[in-house]
Image: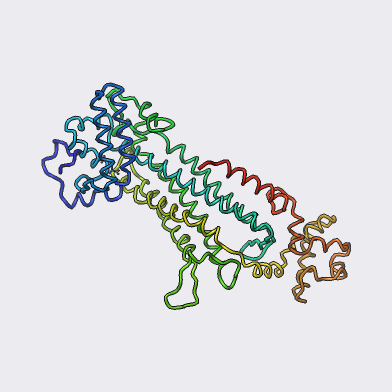
Amino acid sequence: MASPSRSGVFQQSTDRRMEDFAESISFDRRLYPQDIRGSIAHAQMLHSVGLLNEEENRQIEQVLKQIQDDIQQQTFPWSVELEDIHMHIEQSLIDRLGDVGRKLHTGRSRNDQVSTDLRLWVRDAIDRVDEQLVALQRAFVGRCDADADIILPAYTHLQRAQPVLAAHYWLAYCEKFERDRGRLADCRKRVNQCPLGAAAVAGTSLPIDRQDVARRLGFDSVAANSMDVSSDRDFVLEAAFVMAVIAEHLSTWADEWILWSTVEFGFIRLPQEFCTGSSIMPQKVNPDVLELTRGKTARVVGNLQTLLVLIKALPLAYNRDLQEDKPALFDSFDTVEACLQLAPLVVEGMQWNRSAISERLERGYLDATSLMEYMIRQGIPQRTAHHCVGQLVGMAIERDLRLAELSLDDFQRICPGLDNGVYEVLGVENAVRAYCSYGSSAPQEVEKQIARWKDKLSLITL
Ligand code: ARG
């Protein structure tokens, strides 16, 4: 089967080994719905400007839909000779319609066609990932009420730092994924520009109507420079970057929970449906879902690197190198979508080990900062208070006591002005109650944030 792109200039057919080397059909066939949608819109536009008559347009649309059915029914024949999805669909149209089919490629090239298909694909993929992020945020917010009475040690440098409400912890992740949603929305704006009609590189002398095609395909605007369009893969880079950031966020969460699920930490129990056993050690319950989420992040980060290097140093405009963008881009979305599908289930099924957590809260002087801030409120300069609390912690460590177990005499020996009021800020519950700043783990602030998130998430209709 000769490729429709092989014009009369060729006297030799393509070497079979070249066909194998050059094909992209093995990975771009998934663009068939976008390719067909783009071609139907293109044909309609050609009809509206008089380059196709009504009957030709009708036949093209009808046959393209038949081709779509055949692909879905898996009766469509694939062949590396036809290189890519665009050629497959066009050739099949020609096989079924003859000369009418030969008119479809009027006023366009595969360079603007592939960019159109890919933009339509990325636009849908962005919308799918966005829905998944909302589902994950809902899982986090859903835990806030159930975990209302839980205080956790917050860590910095992986050292116990200060006590926080569990809800504050859940909402921290909501914020991260909300920024990812913002990045997706921003990226989507630049994805959603119509390249079709830029043709190969310079536009066309045919009287096409690019605005018309853009409207039919739901694009917000028409890309303004045909040379730029032919070479532009910024939208691919941006989408791959956003996938990498989402993967990074998932990976940090996964890593934290891998640690928390160890016997050494013992903070959480993971839902067994998402854990696996060891083939040799019968006692093992391994957190594979989290390890794979963390591990797959490597691929998503690697894909971004692949794409950046791919596009570097390409002269304007289209170069065949660009065909290599698809495996990396598809893999980034597939991987992130696979991780996001399971993440909410793991969040919902996780159980706290309350006793292990409260044991850690008791030890580690998580109320030291609370004491220091109390002293500041008593008029002691911050640096002095910081130093004194350090001495008090040292004293408590030596006697294996909690700060609240030191006597008033002990406190006054280090810091003479102190009175019984110190005991009101000691202990993790008191420390949490004492927070008051915006964005802190103060119960009243967290309450407001939970309400804000509930409101926000119930407003989004999926
Ligand atoms: N398979 C090609 C790709 O994915 C389609 C565009 C080919 N354009 C060309 N002038 N050879 O990039």
Q: Name the spot of residue 91 as percent of width and height, x first.
A: 20, 39
| Res. 117 image quadrant | top left
Q: Is 203 in front, or is 48? A: 48
Q: Out of 417 and 55, give the one closest to the viewer.
A: 55
Rendering colour mode? rainbow
Q: Which residue is drawn at 68% across and 61% down?
A: 151
Q: In this view, does 369 lie above or below 306?
A: below
Residue occupying the point 46% across, 39% down: 188
Tell me if 378 is positioned left or right of 292 in this view.
right
Quarter containing the N terminus:
top left
Q: Which of 333 and 307 is in front in this view?
A: 333
- Quadrant of ligand 1: it is top left
Q: Which residue lies furthest to the left in this view?
A: 11
Q: In which quarter of the image is residue 159?
A: bottom right
Q: In this view, does 120 lie to the left or right of 107?
A: right
| Residue 18 image offset from top left, x and y in percent | 19, 50
Figure quadrant of residue 320:
top left
Q: Position of residue 27 (x, y in %)?
A: 30, 50
Residue 238 visible? The answer is no
Residue depicted at 58% across the width and 45% down the height: 457
**372 on left or right of 255:** right
Vertical placement of 392 versus 432: above or below?
below
Q: In this view, does 315 lie above or below 394?
A: above
Q: How many labels does the image show?
A: 0
Q: What residue sits 49% from the left and 45% below the top?
A: 130
Residue 425 in sight: yes
Residue 295 image offset from top left, x and y in percent: 45, 62
